[in-house]
Image (cartoon, rainbow, N blue to C red):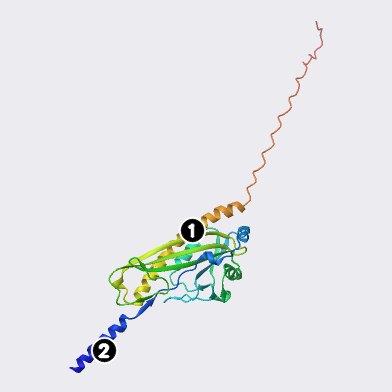
Amino acid sequence: MNRRILVSLLALGLAILQGCATYTTPAAGVNMATLGDDDIVELMSLEPAAQFPARLAVVRVQSAGYRSLTADSYGTGSFSVVTTRDVESEDDFKRIAALDDIAAVAPITRLILPQELNTIRDLRLGAARLKADLLLIYTLDTRFNVESTSLGPLSAVTLGFLPNKEAFVSATTSALLVDVRTGFIYGAAESSARESQRTSMWNSEAAIDNARQLAERNSFKQFVGEFETLWKATLAEHVAASEPEPIAPAAPEPTPEPAVKPPLPPTLDPQPGTYTF
């Protein structure tokens, strides 16, 4: 009898320990406005200098100290860089590389970045080392919600004791297209996606993180379509404007009409004879 009680108590203890396990939501994305300079006069004086076809460098930024179950970040300062492509697919980057007037696409790695990351200029230095003309900076901001309650970044979600309510994960991909040489911003693009589930499915770290990855993956895939639109608008404004207008061929000179010769006087009959007037 005592043995049965002991076994029951052990089983109850294991259930409690499993139920008290938690999943910590990842840190937030980066507010792109905080990456630039605050001097409005300086910002307004920036001019585009990229050459087309352009070499494009790509980098993902997140808040300082970002980590998830599938990726860690690099760098200290105002933000960090994620070099692991955990939600971005190879097909996504092939779509970008296939766009008109893109010569090549290259990821920025931690080997060419400074340890301290505070502004866009720190990222432009890395892109310059790759001889890139343009820099695509993007971030993923992911939110976890149960019904109308937002759990927020770095929230601990207790597993096993959530009621059976509607839960969803929303992810937003935001990006800037920047001129590496001057810092001129050509434009911005953004796309969001949402993955809905029942909280009863959130019974493990892997289950919740799978929902995060699915939302982020769909968000980035939709973002590629938004970037295609931004890229076409960039080419229409900056490439067409920089190309010289074709020189119209000179009109051919009119062919001079032949001069009209005066009529010849009547020829006198060479035969001898008498002429009467």
**Which residue type carries mark 2?**
Leu
On residue 205, which mark appears?
none
**Which residue type carries mark 1?**
Glu
Query: In front: mark 2 or mark 1?
Result: 2
Task: Please give left or right for residue 43 compared with residue 276 in the image.
Answer: left
> What residue is pinned by disc 1?
228
For the residues labelled 2 and 1, the Cα–Cα distance comes to 58 Å
The picture places residue 35, in percent across and down from the top left corner, at: 55, 67
The picture places residue 73, in percent across and down from the top left corner, at: 49, 76
SS state under label 1: helix
- Of all residues, the one furthest to the front in this rendering is 149
Give yes or no for contact between labels 2 and 1 (Cβ–Cβ under 8 Å).
no
- Say if 10 sits above or below 121 in the image: below
Image quadrant where residue 210 sits? bottom left
Task: Please give left or right for residue 238 compared with residue 228 in the image.
Answer: right
Residue at the spot 57% in from the left edge and 67% down from the top edge:
120
Task: Please give left or right for residue 258 compared with residue 15 in the image.
Answer: right
Quadrant occupied by the N terminus? bottom left
Residue at the spot 31% in from the left edge and 84% down from the top edge:
17
> What residue is pinned by disc 2?
10
The picture places residue 90, in percent across and down from the top left corner, at: 46, 68
